[in-house]
Amino acid sequence: MKLFNLLLNLLWLFFCGLWMAIGYVIAAVICFIFIVTIPFGIASLRIAGFVLWPFGRTTVERPDAGAPSCIGNVIWVIFAGWWLALAHLITSIPLFLSIIGIPFGWANLKLIPISLMPLGREVIPTDEAFGGR
């Protein structure tokens, strides 16, 4: 299973993971420039790592995330989230047009909710997603 995840992650990195992660890093750098938005930058870097190497990991909502995460996600959607969600959507279109890219197109579409609401989420291994929670 780990070898299969490695193969999928390498293909993902080549087809779309690298430039999508670069988009998240750019959003993080912009957030770090404005001191008040540093928590958004940290969340963006966390999701960039996930977008760079997604297979074998998943995201779950943190149980201690409350109203500040909800308010932060609304601000995130307005300023950066919708750009990243649009990038995932646009990236998925050419992937759907090729046979090998169809699973990666679906994976891109599954990342849209995470790109819209990154605050209050954590990245965990998929083995832990069902048994650990």
Image: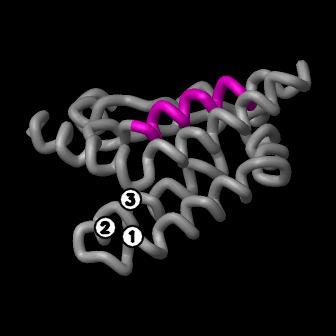
The N terminus, quarter of image: top left
Q: Horizontally, is 66 left or right of 3 in the view? A: right
Q: Residue at x 63, y 44 (%)?
A: 23
Q: Nearer the viewer, residue 69 or 12?
A: 12
Q: Horizontally, is 122 left or right of 36 in the view? A: left
Q: Residues within 10 Å of mark 2 (few under 14, many from 20)?
A: some
* Disc 3 to disc 1: CB gap under 8 Å: no
Q: Main secondary structure of the magenta part?
A: helix
* Badge 1 amino acid: Leu
Q: CA distance from mark 3 to mark 2?
A: 10 Å
- Residue under circle 3? 107
Q: Nearer the viewer, residue 20 or 45?
A: 20
Vertical side of 132 occupied by 67: above or below: below
- Residue under circle 1? 95
- Residue under circle 2? 101
* Badge 3 amino acid: Ala
Total marks shown come to: 3
* Disc 1 to disc 2: CB gap under 8 Å: yes
Give the x, y percent position of residue 21.
54, 40
**Callout 2: SS:** loop
**Callout 3: SS:** helix
Q: Nearer the viewer, residue 42 or 90?
A: 90
Considering only order in the chain, which callout, 2 or 1, is on the residue closer to the N terminus?
1
Tell whether position 13 is magenta: no
Tell whether position 50 is magenta: yes
Vertical side of 41 occupied by 118: above or below: below
Give the x, y percent position of residue 9.
28, 42
Q: Residue at x 64, y 33 (%)?
A: 25
How is this picture coloured?
Answer: one colour
Q: What residue range appears in magenta?
A: 40-52
